[in-house]
Image (cartoon, rainbow, N blue to C red):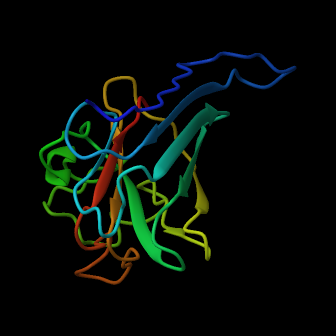
Amino acid sequence: MKRPVLLLMTAFLLTACGGQSPAAETQVSASFARGGEGPAFTYDPALVPVGSTVAVTHTEQDGATVATLRVTGLLPNRTYGAHAHTQPCTAASGADAGPHFQFSEDPVTPSVDPSYANPMNEIWLDVTTDANGAGESTATVPWVFPDDRRAESVVLHEKPTASHAGHAGTAGGRPACVTVDF
């Protein structure tokens, strides 16, 4: 029997607000599962327990993008790196989510140059959990996704994100991933 996964997607809800450009919003909420159907997978249940939850909200408006990550049931009092990635999640491996999405793409792979791997060119959502294993983070970047190139997931990493040259954007292993329709 497959574990139940709660999935709520509100795809591109358009609203016009007096004089402002329309806002496009997406949201996904799910429980992390091992294998089976997505959208959220844990690859290391010791760091991201089966049944812990994730919600990602994404809004584009007035030339900016705001993304919010909410988690529950993770390890208490711990910081996880988290970033938007280029590919959707698979049940097999967090590596399948590809590299971080970069608005201006680094010609060198993997990207560890802080000129490219930084929180204004990528969506960094590092989250610190409280004593109950819950946490929330929000990132705002001064751009919207191009029509032909979008992020497709958020990966939780085992460590906080590094920002120094030669290591910028790195955050260790990929214990969990959630597919998001950015």
Residue 101: tell me if it is visible. Answer: no
- Position of residue 151 in the picture relative to residue 105 (left or right): right
Q: Position of residue 127 (x, y in %)?
A: 52, 66
Q: Position of residue 50 (x, y in %)?
A: 35, 53
Question: 124 and 146: which one is in front?
Answer: 124
Looking at the image, residue 75 lies above or below residue 116: below
Q: Residue at x 43, y 43 (%)?
A: 31
Q: Position of residue 56 (x, y in %)?
A: 52, 42
Q: Residue at x 54, y 68 (%)?
A: 133
Looking at the image, residue 142 lies above or below residue 28: below
Residue 83: tell me if it is visible. Answer: yes
Question: 22 and 171: which one is in front?
Answer: 171
Question: 57 and 44: which one is in front?
Answer: 44
Which of the 4 image quadrants contains residue 49? Answer: bottom left
Q: Quadrant of the C terminus?
A: top left
- Position of residue 156 in the picture relative to residue 109 (left or right): right
